[in-house]
Image (cartoon, rainbow, N blue to C red):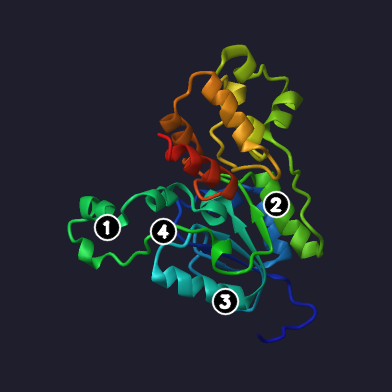
Amino acid sequence: MTIRGATARPRLAVWKFASCDGCQLTLLNCEDELLLLADAVEIAHFTEASSAHVDGPYDLSLVEGSITTPADLERVQEIRRASRRLVSIGACATSGGIQALRNFADVGEFTSLVYARPEYIDTLARSTPISAHVPVDFELHGCPVDRRQLLEVVVAYLDGRTPRIPAETVCADCKRRGNVCVVVAHGQACLGPVTQSGCGALCPSCARGCYGCFGPAPGVNVGSLVGRLLENGMGEPDVVRILRTFTAEAPAFREEADTHDSRA
């Protein structure tokens, strides 16, 4: 790794793996803040915004997407070696994303159904988060990530401090917004009591249950919530389905889903 001049702006890189690009678009949608950020850093790699590329080392790398191919696996290790700090952003990068549903099925069968010439598809059997392959300095959850939290993470690392992201559930956001609880009032299935906050309780604010896009919050008791869902009439297959949606490889959701999958 080479050493740049002390007056050089911090070098920021944004990388994409298997994903929909939604988290990169969240950064582009920062609009006014993005202009200030572009003045404060050197954007060395951000394919969603520009074809320009500057070789590393990078002071901060934001990584979107999951690892799904042998080439991905080699590339993420190169990015890690070139990055002083690496932050994985979004459900795909932190817990495999929707494409992790392949982890519970036969990927060979999927490719044979989707592609006319599946023999040309070079893919891994599982979709895995970035942290399964390289050390990660911070994981920012969400599908997509929240723009305010994303800016906080970027600014924090540029300032040399730890990001201040609240470790609380969607229920806290519901209380702040004065939402009527969809579980208590309407008996709806809702993952809000166990899901990391950040979306501003978007779905409960529209009178529907939380889908768990931000993944499990630290220290939550998923089994206790699932017990309540079963008491309210949800079947074992539906329990598995709601836990294996956006963040199927998040350990707290995966372990509880595996338990009920064996009973379904």
**Residue that mark 2 sits on:** 151
Q: CA distance from mark 4 to mark 2?
A: 31 Å
CB atoms of marks 1 and 4 within 8 Å? no
Q: Do we see residue 235 in this rendering? A: yes
Residue contact between numbered discs 1 and 2, judged by CB atoms under 8 Å: no
Label 3 sits on residue: 54
Tell which tag, 1 or 2, sits nearer the viewer. 1
In the rendering, at what x and y percent does residue 241 appear?
Answer: 44, 35
Q: Which residue is mark 1?
A: 108
Query: Which is more N-terminal, label 2 or label 3?
Result: 3
Q: Mark 2 belongs to which amino acid?
A: Leu
Q: Secondary structure at mark 2?
A: helix
Instruction: Characterize the local packing of mark 3: few (<14), some (14-19) or many (20 or more) Cα atoms within 10 angstroms.
Output: some
Q: Which mark is residue 126?
A: 4
Asked whether the residues under the numbered discs 4 and 3 touch, taking CB atoms below 8 Å apart as contact, a structural biologist would say: no
Is residue 200 visible in this depiction of the protein? no
**Nearest to N terminus: mark 4 or mark 3:** 3
Label 2 neighbour load within 10 Å: few <14, some 14-19, many 20+:
some
* Label 1: element kind: helix
Horizontal and vertical percent position of residue 97: 48, 49
